[in-house]
Amino acid sequence: MKIIQTDLLCIGAGLAGERVAIEAADNGFSVICLSIVPARRSHSSAAQGGMQAALGNSAMGEGDSPDVHFADTVKGSDWGCDQEVARLFVDAAPIAMRQMAFWGVPWNRVVPGEQTYYKGGKPFTAFEKPENEGLIHSRNFGGTAKWRTCYTSDGTGHCVLYTLDNRAAQMGVNVVDKVEAIALIHDGDTCMGAIARCLKTGELTAYLARATLVATGGFGRIYRESTNAVICDGGGLIAALDTGVVSLGNMEAVQFHPTGIVPTDILVTEGCRGDGGTLLDKNEYRFMPDYEPDKAELASRDVVSRRMTEHMRKGLGVPSPYGDHLWLDIRHLGEHHIRTKLREVDEICQSFLGVDPVHQLIPVRPTQHYSMGGVRTNKDGAAYGLKGLFSAGESACWDMHGFNRLGGNSLAETVVAGMIIGGKIVEFLKGTETTFSTAAVRDAMNKQTSRIADLVACKHGSENPYTVRNAMFDSIMKGAGIFRNGQDLEKCVGELQEILGRARKVGLRSNGKGANPELTMALKIEGMVKLALCVAYGALKRTESRGAHTREDFPERNDRDWLTRTLATWADGADLPTLNYEPATHTFEMPPGDRGYGGGKIIPMNG
Amino acid sequence: MGRTLTFNIFRYNPSDPASTPHMDKFTLDETERMTLFIALNRIREELDPTLMFDFCCRAGICGACAMVINGRPGLACHTKTKEMPDEITLMPLPVFKLVGDLSVDTGVWFRTMYQKIESWVHTDKKFDPTAQEERMDNGLAEQIYELDRCIECGCCVAACGTALMREDFLGAVALNRLARFILDPRDQRTEKEYFDVVGTDEGIFGCMGLLACEDVCPKEIPLQEQLGKLRRKMALAAVKNILPKFLKKDF
Ligand SMILES: Cc1cc2nc3c(=O)[nH]c(=O)nc-3n(C[C@H](O)[C@H](O)[C@H](O)COP(=O)(O)OP(=O)(O)OC[C@H]3O[C@@H](n4cnc5c(N)ncnc54)[C@H](O)[C@@H]3O)c2cc1C
Ligand code: SF4
Ligand code: SF4
Ligand code: FES
């Protein structure tokens, strides 16, 4: 058995994983990061927009402060967040951005004098103060009172990730790529590391660590249509859930984006609609004004996604080999506008669809975009349930996003949480010794070895893992997508339980040797269906609408009964998660109120 | 539409003693807006579950899916089948170590490269969390960003004659990376220090200047311009480095 030992094991080398790793390495601890892909290919690299921090350097950000950022974040979360954590986050975000600058991120900077910006497709001018010249600039993102989003042209995630990966290399962090963690090593009380499978050779290794961090990003790939990278399939969460003692928080809180292109679900920016793009159905009829007479296409992300789904359910979607979709029409904006102001959209359409948006319609559909839920941690990033286990980034429910995260807040979360939780892990490492139980390591390894042997031998059956996955896709998209209601959720949970049974009977058609991708899929399908069940079952039980969680049969946000966070654990052999609840927040810096957008009634706390 | 596409795909699983390098043929009915991302996934899910290839972002951002497509290195995720003939040949990128079929190990190659050129900001300053950020000219920030856009797909390396011949050749991608730090005022390395890293046959002097690298770069990074600039700069540095030593000699 191959065993490698280290102080800190980071499962994941995206922004969150690497930022934590750097903090520990900087304090003299040995750190290993595991990643399915080379660190720089992590999904963080795909974020183009930017990250929020109240620096207040730009004209449109003037008067901004952590307090304003705090209010935006809590409102955005629809009061589902932990306010203590939101406060920690907004206060530290400016420091984190400056630190990124110090390490080499080429942030866009303030250019003094009169500048032309765009809002709602219309140009306007603003005066940038000469004394702010050369400080970090910011752009506009939805749901914020001030322009607060720091950015590097259209490659924020890319630049920040490359900078952090450079820094990690400099600090001697050992990043091992093409390795996938498939189980945690633990004794029901303490986490001791993970069993990982090499995606080059198929070999298993036990990584033993005094502290283990899950930073595996989102789990969007339990949905067929997702803007997430294809590796965002929840591996870290599955390993955590499989311990039986670690809780996943708010798994039902899933964010959708209205305009993923069909077939590959690459995101095209909200700017298209902001600039005057319209949505059409199969009859090329503009339907949004029928549903939202005031705002039409410009209603918030969740509202537009809901209306699009509603319209397609009426049979008015455009049929295609990839399922139904709608059209986004920007032709009327004209060639000049499209090729300059919407250059990125133009490029995406041409490169990935072969569609020229100046003359042709763009096929779009609402698409899973962000997972608010994840490994539930306390404010120090320590996971509920196991000592020595931590989580940060999109895989965590640290919980500053509640039921809806704001654009620009998750990229910022990765480095801010990385900094704060990294510090807490350093404290933990300084104060604790772990004894590794050889029995726990051997058991964990044996379990995985025999799982693989069983899959290769088709011991429990020969269900095709891809077929099972497709069944899960069908079920969750229909039952626990953008719109939810008791009847559909009930049906979805039933279907998923049946699919879980099939997932437990998968077997390989091939020999499973080396980097065999069929085995990779087979090893995680049962866990993916479990995550889907956490989403669907949590959504069924939550009889209210909050943030991205919309129940047609319970349209009110119900603060009286549901100002809570869902905690899901999975008992060995069960076919449903166990749900528990805790208060959404222990401190109220800002009492529940109206978000100011999205409409909807509220049942007050003491109503 | 209505075409049937034939894919000739390189196959070899080095972890399986029974496997030998060969080409396999697969056919698929073309669908609307099909890309190689869709086609390869369909082949794996419907025809051969063992087929190894890499995709990650499937949006041209992460660089994972580079392969040799009908003889030319490129990103599979933004290759549309409708722009291809009905026979498509796919090979793994050369130079990089083969993982299996179309999948290669770019991670180790690039990590070695950036360790060699120490691809991070060298400074003796310490970060002060209480201070305002140091100012930078926006134009300069944008210039750095232009060079920072490389996605480490490896296409330029795979297309480079020198890289094919010498295993230690750093490639245009490394020189571009270094150029980024030369531009960056936060990096305090001297010209001599840069020279020590790339002023050799592994670096700038190994390059034959045929520019296959720039031709295939999916991000259209101005590799040619950077190579030219660096070569001139390094040639100058070389002269400066040699001269003092020469003068110190007794003769
Ligand atoms: C298209 C798109 C655009 C976005 N734009 C923005 C934006 O502009 N602003 C913003 O704030 N947010 C944005 N987001 C969200 C944001 O990018 C992510 O939430 C954030 O980058 C997540 O970072 P992370 O470090 O938590 O995870 P990731 O960057 O996803 O990294 C996960 C890491 O875990 C590894 N991993 C996964 N599973 C395993 C396993 N089992 N074993 C070992 N390693 C594993 C992966 O290889 C990877 O290294 C966007 C998201 C999408 C999809
Ligand atoms: S110009 Fe230089 S780096 Fe580019 S392909 Fe030719 S030899 Fe390689
Ligand atoms: S320079 Fe261009 S071709 Fe080379 S690795 Fe970077 S993006 Fe790819
Ligand atoms: S999959 Fe990321 S560039 Fe092709």
Image (tube, coloured by chain):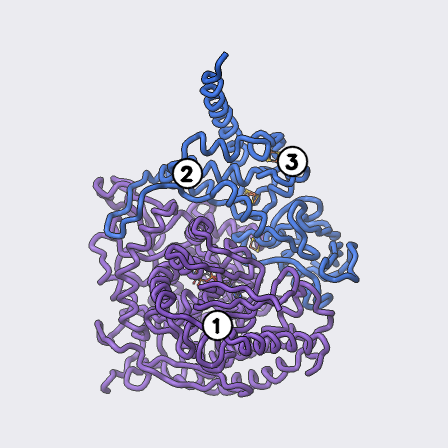
Q: Are marks 3 and 2 on the same chain?
A: yes
Which residue position is annotated with label 1? Answer: A192
- Nearer-the-camera pick, A185 or A418: A185
Tag 3 subunit:
B
Asked if one can make out residue A229 in the rendered structure from this viewpoint, the answer is yes
Tag 3, which secondary structure?
helix
Q: Is residue A596 left or right of residue B249?
A: left
Q: Are marks 3 and 1 on the same chain?
A: no
Image location of residue B193, percent across then percent down: 45, 33
Colour applied to chain B: blue
> In the rendered image of this protein, does residue A531 appear above or below residue A162?
below
Q: Nearer the viewer, mark 2 or mark 1?
A: 1
What kind of residue is marked 2?
Answer: Gln
Ligand 2 shows up in the quarter that is: top right
Q: Chain of mark 2?
A: B
Please state which amino acid type lies under the numbered disc 3.
Thr
Q: Is mark 3 within 8 Å of ligand 2?
A: yes
Residue under label 3 = B162
Residue located beneath label 2 in the image: B143
Between B84 and B241, the one nearer to me in the picture = B241
Q: Amino acid at mark 1?
A: Met
Percent coordinates x, y for residue B46 in the rendering: 70, 68
Mark 3 → mark 2, Cα distance in angstroms: 28 Å
Q: Give the Cα separation between the discs numbered 3 and 1.
A: 46 Å
Quadrant location, the N terminus of chain A: bottom right
**Residue A368, visible in the rendered structure:** no
* Residue plotted at (27% across, 52% down): B129
